[in-house]
Image (cartoon, rainbow, N blue to C red):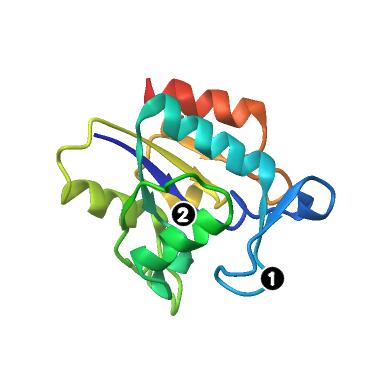
């Protein structure tokens, strides 16, 4: 089983939304949620070529159920989002702050059938401790997952 560990803000939602083509869902996390169309296209392409499933790592997993996350991503243009779960919350010791790397590793520990995975996130490498850097597609809030380079690197990781 191949997995895409997916953040949302800084990956599918970017500051380029006002500059580029966007998809305004008006039904998602809040009424102002806008998905970057290039990032959504790249995610759809990645899912199609890799047959990977999605595990949401975004903080949105703390306030939305898997069913709600599917609805949000569908409304944002992701075709039949293959979300199979979310990572557990693992604190890094500071109030209200989690540690993505530990959360991903915990999820992987409980799901040994994973054969390959990629992490698409805009957080700092420090918050992804324990995850091999070659598995991380680090995005920026400017471009998110909307660049061809990010897409190609994610494909390479999953092949």
For the point 64% across and 45% down, the residue is 144
Disc on res. 89: none
Dot 1 surroundings within 10 Å: few (below 14), some, or many (20 or more)? few
Question: Measured from the top left, where is residue 25 in percent x and y?
Answer: 63, 62
Classify mark 1: helix, strand or loop: loop
Residue nearest the viewer, comparing 83 with 129: 83
Instruction: Write down the residue under mark 2.
Output: 127
Q: CA distance from mark 1 to mark 2?
A: 27 Å
Name the quadrant of the N terminus. top left
Rendering quarter of residue 100 = bottom left
Q: Which residue is mark 1?
A: 32
Local secondary structure at mark 2: helix
- Tell whether 43 sits left or right of 143: left
The total of numbered circles placed on residues is 2
Q: Position of residue 3 (x, y in %)?
A: 33, 39
**Quadrant for the C terminus in the image:** top left
Determine the residue positioned at 71% across, 43% down.
Answer: 143
At 42% across and 68% down in the image, what residue appears? Answer: 68
**CB-based contact (under 8 Å), mark 1 and mark 2:** no
Label located before the other in sequence (1 or 2)? 1
Residue 11 vs residue 20, the one in the foreground: 20
**Comparing marks 1 and 2, which lies closer to the viewer?**
1
**Does residue 56 appear left or right of residue 144 in this picture?**
left
Residue 145, horizontal then vertical, whole percent:
61, 40
Q: Is residue 156 above or below residue 7?
A: above
Q: Is residue 34 above or below residue 52?
A: below
How far across and how far down the image is residue 59, in percent? 47, 66
**How packed is label 2: few (under 14 Cα within 10 Å), some, or many (20 or more)?**
some
Relative vertical location of residue 62 with respect to residue 137 in this rendering, above or below = below
Give 103 or 151, whichever is nearer the viewer. Answer: 151
């Amino acid at each position: 089983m191949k997995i895409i560990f997916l953040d949302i803000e800084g990956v599918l939602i970017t500051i380029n939304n006002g500059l580029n083509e966007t998809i305004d869902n008006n039904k998602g996390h809040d009424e102002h949620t806008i998905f970057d169309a290039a990032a959504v296209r790249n995610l759809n392409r990645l899912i199609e070529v890799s047959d990977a499933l999605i595990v949401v790592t975004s903080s949105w997993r703390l306030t939305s159920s898997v069913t709600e996350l599917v609805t949000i991503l569908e409304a944002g243009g992701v075709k039949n989002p293959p979300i199979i779960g979310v990572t557990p919350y693992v604190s890094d010791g500071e109030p209200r702050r989690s540690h993505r790397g530990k959360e991903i590793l915990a999820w992987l520990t409980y799901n040994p059938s994973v054969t390959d995975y990629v992490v698409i996130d805009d957080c700092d490498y420090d918050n992804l401790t324990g995850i091999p850097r070659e598995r991380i597609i680090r995005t920026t809030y400017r471009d998110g997952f909307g660049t061809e380079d990010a897409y190609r690197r994610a494909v390479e990781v999953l092949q």
